[in-house]
Image (cartoon, rainbow, N blue to C red):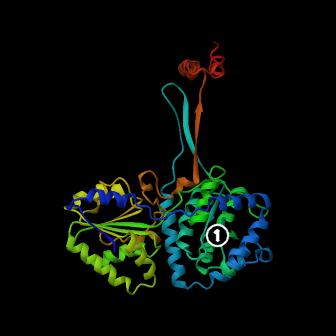
Amino acid sequence: MPLELNAAEPGFAARFDALVKAKRDAEADVGATVAAIIADVRARGDAVLHELNQKFDRVDSARLGLRITTAEMEKAAAEVDARTMEALETAASRIRDFHLRQMPQDELYTDVAGVTLGHRWTPLDAVGLYVPGGKAAYPSSVLMNAIPAQVAGVRRIVVCVPTPDGHLNPLLMAAFRLLGLGEVYRTGGAQAVAAMAYGTESIAAVDKITGPGRDYVATAKRQVFGQVGIDNPAGPSEILVVSDNKNDPAWIAADLLSQAEHDEVAQAVLITDDAAFAKAVGEAVREQLSSMPRGNIAAASWERFGALITVKTLADAPALVDRLAPEHLELAIDDPQAMADRVRHAGAIFLGRLTPEAIGDYVAGPNHVLPTAGAARFASGLNLLDFMKRTTIVGCDAAALRRIGPAAVALAEAEGLPAHARSVAIRLGA
């Protein structure tokens, strides 16, 4: 049964605290195995990718070649129907437009001391995108990861995707072709992450790796961090819906299940000010589960990690939202903007009764790669700046150095770094 909480009942604070702190995705103890794979890839390169492709995906990449050709992609993509292609194009256009608006501006100015100061933004040279190709294959994630990199001006985008039994997922191939992604390799797992981080004979190293993946991939990304940059490793999906009783319970149930169907350890939570409405939503969830194609997955998520929370007034909801810091927050209430203004911690906020979270997964425009497991307290969703870096600029003429140099000398001497002090003082004639 999903957790049922009522803020008016004794023990609510402790039970809610347990909900906040509950660990949903126990990390597999794969650190040593992943480290060995990474070391092997660094030592033997392509040979390891071929061996593991054969072992795990039953693919003879030594014969086929690691790189998927344009012709192969086009052949697979041709299987995608026109309606789906049009939807991909719509999504790509909206995602591109939203991220174009995030473009930062360079600045260069002279301050009151006469010092030239500023900063400039430059794109990363090369980015690696990991794309799951087995149990989960989501072309929407290709768009969400690759388009910001393209908008930022990244020169080279590398894609690694597993191809179980040699199958090229048509939707993924269509997304690659739509975006003009030509450097795509048939390899997955920790070995793909290692190949992108350190390079092999066929795959030149990149500067940053993004994209979703479970135990082995997430662990590998953490282990190569420092050699390359990485995005925030994503945990299980989650949704928190704040709703009054003016909504159709079936709508809210569908929203909760839209995330529960992702994974057995996903989480769906409702906060409402009406206990009868919470009960009606719970009943609607059970009814919809009986006919869902992924009902077994969604049911496991709902039964183990779902929650129905009743509060005295919805004015109490923002404090609970901030404690949970959800990946997705739906505000299905009369004045959603007013409540959104009171929320500090959420990966993405969906305003009003007609904005289901699923619209953000595909075609709204903002990125759907969002912080999970409470990371919204300190992290943001994937965005344009993840594919750029800022360089600061400083310039002094003689007058400016005379104005600020003595303070630098004093601080360097106070820190016991005489060479630092001398490098400034010698220019001041001291």
- The x, y position of residue 261, in whole percent, is 44, 76
Residue 226 appears anywhere in the view = yes
- How many numbered discs sit on the rendered protein? 1
Quarter holding residue 204? bottom right
- The x, y position of residue 237, in whole percent, is 45, 67
* Above-or-below relation of 339 to 276: above
The residue that appears at 77% across and 62% down in the rendered structure is 45
Horizontal relation, residue 217 to residue 300: left or right:
right
Residue 66 appears anywhere in the view = no
Which corner quadrant holds the N terminus?
Answer: bottom left
Q: What amino acid type should be assigned to the residue bearing mark 1?
A: Gly
The residue that appears at 51% across and 53% down in the rendered structure is 103
- The x, y position of residue 146, in whole percent, is 58, 64
Out of 403 and 56, give the one closest to the viewer.
56
The residue that appears at 76% across and 66% down in the rendered structure is 48
Out of 157 and 267, give the one closest to the viewer.
267
* Above-or-below relation of 304 to 32: below
Which corner quadrant holds the C terminus?
Answer: top right
Out of 344 and 81, give the one closest to the viewer.
344
* Above-or-below relation of 100 to 87: above
Mark 1 surroundings: few (<14), some (14-19) or many (≥20) residues within 10 A: few
The residue that appears at 36% across and 70% down in the rendered structure is 306
- The x, y position of residue 241, in whole percent, is 32, 67
Q: SS for tag 1?
A: loop
**Residue bearing the label numbered 1:** 180
Out of 367 and 375, give the one closest to the viewer.
375
Specify the farthest residue to the bottom: 291
Quarter holding residue 247? bottom left
Quarter holding residue 334? bottom left
